[in-house]
Structure formats: structure tokens, C-alpha cells
Image (spheres, rainbow, N blue to C red):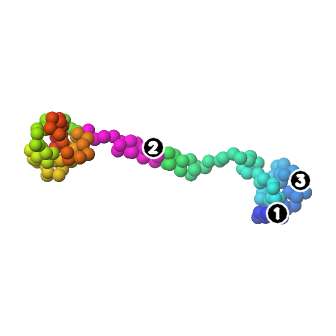
Amino acid sequence: MSAIALHDLQDFETTQAGRDGGRTPGRRDHLRVVAPGERAPVDGGRTGQLVLTRRGRLAVTLTVATVLVLAVVAALGMLPATASAGHTVTVQPGDTLSQIAVSELPELPMDRAIVQIQLANDLNTLHIQAGMELAIPQP
């Protein structure tokens, strides 16, 4: 038998003598001893029902809001970066990406100019072929 603290001895005696599940009409429920295998009444005798407190509702609301914000940030982060309006250049035989980057974007350092051209054209390499049309973004 598991023991639960009793409010007072009189309530314990009433519970044992009453045999009404621990409730006497007109009296408040008090803590009582629960026999092994017996389910203790929860929240006025209602078992299995979830009672969400104000703090619980706040926690659920903040969790849902955080998940939504993270989902939006992740979705926006996955969108491809669009190149700002610029012009196109046709690659001539013997041209390299670094030569085109220096000549077309002289205001940027060469490495940053190469990266900007790669991003604008979805290139993952430095190799380009004659006849390719490369979009040159605005710096």
C-alpha cells in the first residue's frame, strides 16, 4: 500500500468508514491512502483528461511560434540568391574566369569578383568553355 500524506486523522477515518471512494457528500476531497492497483482520482475524479495550465499554454504557444519562425528562416535561406541586373558576356577562346572577373568587375578584388560571377551563373568550378554566356552581376 502506498502512503499519501493525510490532511488530518478525521478525514482518514471518514474515508475508511464511508466506502464511497473517499468522498463524503458536502465535503471537500482530501488526500487519502490509495490501495495497490487502485487509480487515484485526478482533478475531481476525472481520469485521463489533460489539464493545460496558463504556463503550459504559454510554453506550447512559444514552441509553435519558434518552430514556425525557424521554418520560415530555413525556407528563405534555401532560396537561391538572385543576381542583380547586369549584362552578359560571351566567353571567347582562351578566356579564363579570372580574366573575365578582372575586366568586368574591376571595383572588386579578383577572388570576390570570381565568386560573384560563379553565384550568378550557378557555376561550381573555375572552368569555362568558349561560347558560354556568363551573366555579370552588378557589384
Q: What stretch is highlighted in magenta?
A: 66-82
Whichever of labels 3 and 2 marks the residue nearer the N terminus, that label is 3
Q: Which amino acid does label 2 sit on?
A: Leu
Residue at the spot 17% in from the left edge and 36% down from the top edge = 132
Mark 1 residue crowding within 10 angstroms, few (<14) / some (14–19) / many (20+): few
Q: What residue type is labelled 1?
A: Met
Residue 4 in magenta stretch = no
Most foreground residue, 99 or 25: 99
Main secondary structure found in the magenta portion: helix
Residue at the spot 13% in from the left edge and 45% down from the top edge = 96
Q: In which quarter of the image is the N terminus?
A: bottom right
Mark 3 residue crowding within 10 angstroms, few (<14) / some (14–19) / many (20+): few
Residue placed under numbered mark 3 in the picture? 19
Q: Which amino acid does label 3 sit on?
A: Arg
Using the numbered discs, state the Cα–Cα distance from disc 3 to disc 2 in whole angstroms.
Answer: 52 Å
Using the numbered discs, state the Cα–Cα distance from disc 1 to disc 3 in whole angstroms.
Answer: 17 Å
Residue placed under numbered mark 2 in the picture? 68
